[in-house]
Image (cartoon, rainbow, N blue to C red):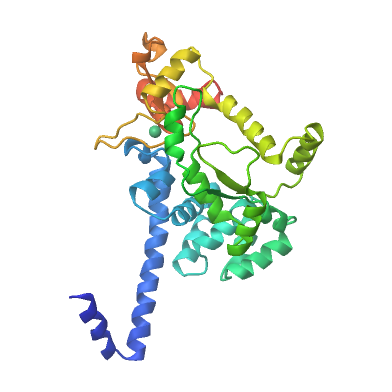
């Protein structure tokens, strides 16, 4: 049946029938959602995303299933909270089913839940809407507003091509930051809205030095130690623009992360990064190459323990998830679990 005909046919329904149908579909939607979370828990536990060519369940949901970032984050949060607090799993499942707990509310309390307060917190927010939960958390959690406003606002400016910049920096030590994902998450978490965001952004936008390449507007409220550190750095470098201080701090972090601690000589590592285009090289059975560009590791195709060497032909870039998967394939899950537990990996 065509949609137009279907809609027309609904004109004949009585009010009771219409409300009943909507009620039924909403109930089905909630039941399906609760079931999706249960299956997601098992999918994540088995790390099946790795086999499918993704670096996390989140990436699989967004890039593989085409789910919106916020939807994927909320589903992951609900799954994690049920795994972390198994005593709560039944209650959370039932409340999602009967509509007393939305995934948005679960995400709002996600970072405030602990073993001592989980049952009570979950009871308190049940049946509340977003605004009511905001109020509840503001009264309940010390420094809640500061935490909210401390979240950053960030936008890659139009016309700036991050990918091109990455390409041109290949061969140096640069490893691309997962800008898009970070951007999406920060946008989703941003405490500021609309005009406020723009106003704040405009105030802080102008970089100290105009350089070609990508440009990012960043608005961030630092609290506590972070604020003290920035004030101290401004005292130490009074003539340096705050953006320059952030630039330098990012540079230090990037250097620390760029080339992973590895026995492989830096020159060869760079060669591998260029050859593999700074991206995880894992390819799933159906031909999908993992798109992960963050936290890349140099992997020995034939492990050193099995006679492999440091020649570029024996090296490849893998993300953390796929590096671990390959290690498990070589050495077995139990061996790798013990190794990771003992901190030697
Ligand atoms: Zn990967």
Above or below residue 247? Residue 71 is below
Residue 2 placement (x, y as % from top left): 19, 75
Q: Is residue 168 left or right of residue 141?
A: left
- Inspect this view and state whether residue 327 appears: no
Q: Residue at x 63, y 48 (%)?
A: 205
Q: Residue furthest right?
A: 235
Is 277 in front, or is 32? 277
For residue 254, what is the image quadrant? Answer: top right
Q: Residue at x 44, y 29 (%)?
A: 168
Q: Quadrant of ligand 1?
A: top left
Residue 155 placement (x, y as % from top left): 54, 49
Above or below residue 139? Residue 259 is above
Q: Residue furthest left?
A: 1
Image quarter of the N terminus: bottom left
Is 13 in front, or is 309? 309
Q: Is residue 48 left or right of residue 184?
A: left
- Inspect this view and state whether residue 315 appears: yes
Residue 246 placement (x, y as % from top left): 66, 37
């Amino acid at each position: 049946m065509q949609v137009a005909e279907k809609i027309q046919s609904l004109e004949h329904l009585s009010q009771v029938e219409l409300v009943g149908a909507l009620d039924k579909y909403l109930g089905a939607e909630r039941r399906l959602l609760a079931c999706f979370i249960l299956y997601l828990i098992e999918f994540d536990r088995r790390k099946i995303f790795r086999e499918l060519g993704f670096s996390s369940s989140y990436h699989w949901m967004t890039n593989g299933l085409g789910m919106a970032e916020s939807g994927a984050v909320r589903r992951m949060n609900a799954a994690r909270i049920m795994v972390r607090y198994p005593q709560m799993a039944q209650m959370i499942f039932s409340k999602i089913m009967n509509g007393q707990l939305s995934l948005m509310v679960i995400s709002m309390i996600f970072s405030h839940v602990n073993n001592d307060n989980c049952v009570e917190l979950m009871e308190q927010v049940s049946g509340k809407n977003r605004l009511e939960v905001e109020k509840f958390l503001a009264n309940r959690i010390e420094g809640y507003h500061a935490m909210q406003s401390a979240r950053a606002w960030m936008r890659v400016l139009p016309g700036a091509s991050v990918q091109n910049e990455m390409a041109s920096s290949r061969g140096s030590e640069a490893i691309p930051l997962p800008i898009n994902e970070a951007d999406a998450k920060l946008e989703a978490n941003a405490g500021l809205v609309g005009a406020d965001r723009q106003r704040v952004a405009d105030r802080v936008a102008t970089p100290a030095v105009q350089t070609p390449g990508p440009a990012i507007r960043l608005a961030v409220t630092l609290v506590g130690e972070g604020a003290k550190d920035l004030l101290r750095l401004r005292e130490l470098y009074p003539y340096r623009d705050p953006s320059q201080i952030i630039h330098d701090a990012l540079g230090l972090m990037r250097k620390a992360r760029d080339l992973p601690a590895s026995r492989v000589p830096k020159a060869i590592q760079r060669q591998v990064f260029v050859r593999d285009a700074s991206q995880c090289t894992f390819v799933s059975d159906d031909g999908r190459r993992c798109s992960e560009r963050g936290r890349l590791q140099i992997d020995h195709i034939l492990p050193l323990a099995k006679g492999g060497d440091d020649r570029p032909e024996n090296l490849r870039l893998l993300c953390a998830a796929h590096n671990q998967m390959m290690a498990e394939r070589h050495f077995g899950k139990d061996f790798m679990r013990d190794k990771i537990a003992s901190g030697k990996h």
